[in-house]
Amino acid sequence: MKEGITPGMTSPDFTFDSPWDNSLKFHDFLKNDRALLIFLRYMGCPLCQLKISEISRDIDQFKKAGTNVFIVLQSQPEIINDMTNEKDMPMTIICDPDMEIFKLYNVNPGSIFRYISPGIIKKALRAKKEGFTHGKSEGKELQLPAVFLVDTNKAVKYAYYGKNIGDIPDNQSLLDKIKSTSSPI
């Protein structure tokens, strides 16, 4: 089994499609700003919709910290296009329906035993309360999340692999990690 990405490694580069653009190179985005690469399941997942909403809410804080946010989903571009539009997505959405980027970063599915936990149930209830509903299922339902902070030199500064489908750091923790790994100017 391939080992995961760890701090200090060079981030793997890849070409990707978003719902609105094709054949973009990840490392091309690292010329001026860092990148926060967040792996989620798919656009129809209410937990993923909740996290995307939270990132959208706090996007100005990430930008102020010199960090562009990328969300990697198992979704087809046309499904995302049916659910939203580019102007409502202040971050870059990466479509990876064949899970090539998930594999490149060693972001794997979990087991059914990690699917349900009290934390996931709490997040699911919050997502439902905020109006997020389950859409089309795509990819692997048991897909685990992950987060990577990559600097302008393409070095991974932070890596986090979720232990269940809802295990992803909150935005304030991510912003604190960005601040703590920033190089002095």
Image (cartoon, helix red, strand yellow):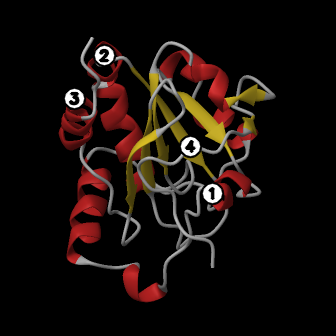
**Few, some or many residues within 10 Å of mark 3 (<14, 14–19, 20+):** few
User: Does the residue at mark 3 contact the one at mark 4 (Cβ under 8 Å)?
Assistant: no
Residue at image coords 49%, 37%: 155
- Could you say where residue 160 lies in the image, as x and y percent from the top left? 37, 56
Does label 2 or label 1 sit earlier along the sequence? 2
Q: Is residue 50 left or right of residue 43?
A: left
Seen from this angle, which residue lies furthest right? Answer: 23
**Few, some or many residues within 10 Å of mark 2 (<14, 14–19, 20+):** some
Foreground: disc 2 or disc 3: 3
Q: Would you identify the image quadrant in which residue 143 lies?
A: bottom right
Foreground: disc 2 or disc 4: 4
Residue type, label 1: Phe
- Could you say where residue 52 lies in the image, as x and y percent from the top left? 41, 39
Quadrant occupied by the C terminus: top left
Foreground: disc 3 or disc 4: 4
Q: Nearer the viewer, residue 32 or 64?
A: 32
Numbered circle sitting on residue 60? 2
- Could you say where residue 87 lies in the image, as x and y percent from the top left? 54, 15
**Few, some or many residues within 10 Å of mark 4 (<14, 14–19, 20+):** some
Foreground: disc 3 or disc 1: 3
Numbered circle sitting on residue 179? 3
Q: Which residue is mark 1?
A: 102
Does label 4 or label 1 sit earlier along the sequence? 4
Numbered circle sitting on residue 10? 4
- Could you say where residue 149 lies in the image, as x and y percent from the top left? 41, 39
Residue type, label 3: Lys
Q: Nearer the viewer, residue 135 or 173?
A: 173
